Image (cartoon, rainbow, N blue to C red):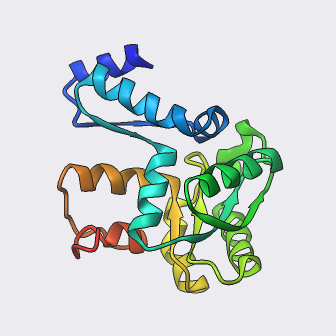
Amino acid sequence: VNHFARYLGSRGVDFVIHGGGPLVVARGGNYEAEIVKGIEEASGVRATTGVRAAQEALHAIGADRIAIASPYPRAHNEAMAAYLRAKGFDVVHAEGRDIGFKDLQNVPPSEIYRFVRDVAIRAGDCDAVYLPCPQWQTADLVATLERDTGKPVVAYTHANFFVAFRALGMRDAIQGHGRLLASLADGRA
């Protein structure tokens, strides 16, 4: 990782995001801090992990009681839920689809929409729904899901953008992608 971080730093990037939520979650809470520190030292710029970005995004919208809707198998959902609980979140429901890695991008958005909507209903009284996979086509569904469920929805990719944009002082009006990214412009972030 540090080799790639040095390379990115040499290219003049402003922020580095480490992807791979399952890896970070599997390695435990201290790994997240270690990897961010290593990336920042090697690249010379600020960094985060996708899992850390999700936590920051959920905190920014005031979400403590969350539901997780993912394409992952049960074991990973349980690991993600345990990880987020250890970080202070009340995970009221975690549900996955057990979709094979090479098939993630092939799931139609309409199918994802129905699944996430149903998870939000089964979760009951939660503050937000977290969608933890960047390869799953969720980003364009967030605003519609928020409208139809009445709950904030945080997609993995949106959380990463939110944290990077906020760290870089970007306050552009981002509409059509849900409450989280819209909050950058109105100063709530």
Question: Which residue appears at 30% of the width and 17% of the height?
Answer: 6
Q: In which quarter of the image is residue 34?
A: top left
Looking at the rendered image, the quarter that the N terminus falls into is: top left
- Nearer-the-camera pick, 35 or 179: 35
Q: Depth check: give the residue in front, 113 or 168.
A: 168
The quarter holding residue 18 reads top left
Q: Where is residue 112 in the image (x, y as percent from the top left)?
A: 68, 64
**Does residue 45 show up?**
yes
* Residue 54 spot, x, y in % from top left: 48, 55
Which quadrant is home to the C terminus?
bottom left
Q: In this view, does 177 lie to the left or right of 134?
A: left
Can residue 158 be seen here? The reply is no
Looking at the picture, tell me which residue is in the foreground, 37 or 53: 37
The residue under the point 42% across, 72% down is 61
Residue at x-position 41% and y-position 50%: 160
Above or below, 46 relative to 149: above
> Which x, y percent locates residue 26?
67, 35
152 vs 137: above or below: below
Question: Is 111 placed left or right of 44 in the picture?
Answer: right
Determine the residue positioned at 43% across, 65% down. 59
